[in-house]
Structures are given as C-alpha cells and as structure tokens.
Image (tube, grey):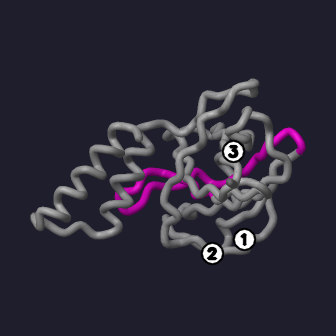
Amino acid sequence: MNRPLLYLVLCFLFLVFSGLGSIDRETILLGLSIAKAEEGTKPSQTTSKGPCKPTPPDALGPFYTPNAPERTSVGKGHILSGVVRTSVDCSPITGARIECWLAGQDGSYDDEHRATLFSDKTGLYKFESNFPPPYMGRPSHIHMKITAKGYQTLITQYYPAHGKTEGEFDVVLIPED
C-alpha cells in the first residue's frame, strides 16, 4: 500500500474508533482519489517475460450505470489510450471490455458521457472525450470498469494531467483464482 493511502486509512480508523469525529463517505472517497492522483496513473511496465504490477483499484463512484452504449467517443478534447495487460507476464489481453464514464463539461454525469469499448488483438484501446472537469473538490478523472474472461474485474480511475489533450493509461489485470 502506498504511503499517502496508508496515512489516510490510518487517520480514518483513528477518528472512527476514537469517537473524535465522523467522516462521511464522500470525504473518504475524496481523500482516496487525491492520494491516487498524487501517486500517478500510468504503470511503467512494458511487455516482458516477468510479472507486471496490477493496476490499483479505485472508487466506483455513485454515477455508474451498466450497459453503456458501444462507442469509442463521447466528445472532443481529450484522447485516452493504453494497453490492457495480464499481471502474469505483461502480455496483452484481447477483447477486454472497458466501460468509461465521466462528467460532461458542466460537471454533471449523463448518458452522453458513457461508453463501452474493447481492446484490440494487441490489447490496445482508445477513448475520446471532453477533458473531464473537476467538481465538488474532486480532481479531473475518468471512471473505468474493465472486465475480461478469466480475469478479476477492475474498477479504477484515470486522472489526466491538467491541460493535456492526450493521456496514456495501461491497465494490468489479475487472473481469476
């Protein structure tokens, strides 16, 4: 566990068990999101014969709706791409289902900013959207839910660098037991 996240968890547990205060769910999720944003979002692995570090999970958030339409674009201004890989040996995963959802330019979630896309035979995916705006203290982010046969489902978030029109986010899945 990385240090910022460990610190947040320990502080939260201290406050809860000491009775010194109450923290609502949104505050906890905000702290976890900020820790994740500070940690960085792009794994540095490339295809190799050794194992890859799995992508850490992140909050699903309250705005997930299943069965997003199949499409690779929900707007213009930011292109997110990457490769879906296995943690076993960093090899690409073909046909991984990637659900993406984000806030529109006005900061609200709607059906127009939801999409389902699939990784190609090299594990590559590409998604185009507006640059996600920050809202209610949350940094800019795109939610992602990745599923692939034989692998654990991953729910994570991508945090684009401010002002960037493109971003790379490789996703590393763990095989099912």
Q: Quadrant of residue 24?
A: bottom left
Label 2: few (<14), some or many (≥20) within 10 Å?
few
Which badge, 2 or 3, comes first in the chain's sequence? 2
**In terms of secondary structure, where does tag 2 sit?**
loop
Q: Is residue 166 visible?
A: no
Residue 40: assigned label: none
**Is residue 38 found left or right of 132 in the rendered image?**
left
- Give the Cα distance between marks 2 and 3: 22 Å
Q: Quadrant of the N terminus?
A: top left
- Amino acid at pointer 2: Thr
Q: Earlier in the sequence, mark 1 or mark 3?
A: 1
Q: Which residue is mark 2?
A: 65
Where is residue 113 drawn, in percent x and y? 65, 66
Q: Main secondary structure of the magenta part?
A: loop
Find the magenta span and give its range.
Answer: 121-144
Expressed as whole percent of the image width and height from the top left, the position of residue 176 reads 69, 54
| Image height of 107 relative to 142, above or below | below
Who's the residue at 57% across and 64% down the image? Answer: 104
- Residue at the spot of label 3: 79
Q: Which mark is residue 68?
A: 1
Q: CB of mark 2 within 8 Å of CB of mark 1?
A: yes
Question: CA–CA distance between discs 2 and 1?
Answer: 7 Å
- Specify the amino acid type for callout 1: Ala
Residue 109 shows in the view: yes
At 51% from the left and 69% from the top, the residue drawn is 108
- Does the CB distance between marks 1 and 3 fall below 8 Å? no
Instruction: Please name which of the two marks, 1 or 3, marks the residue nearer to the observer.
Output: 1
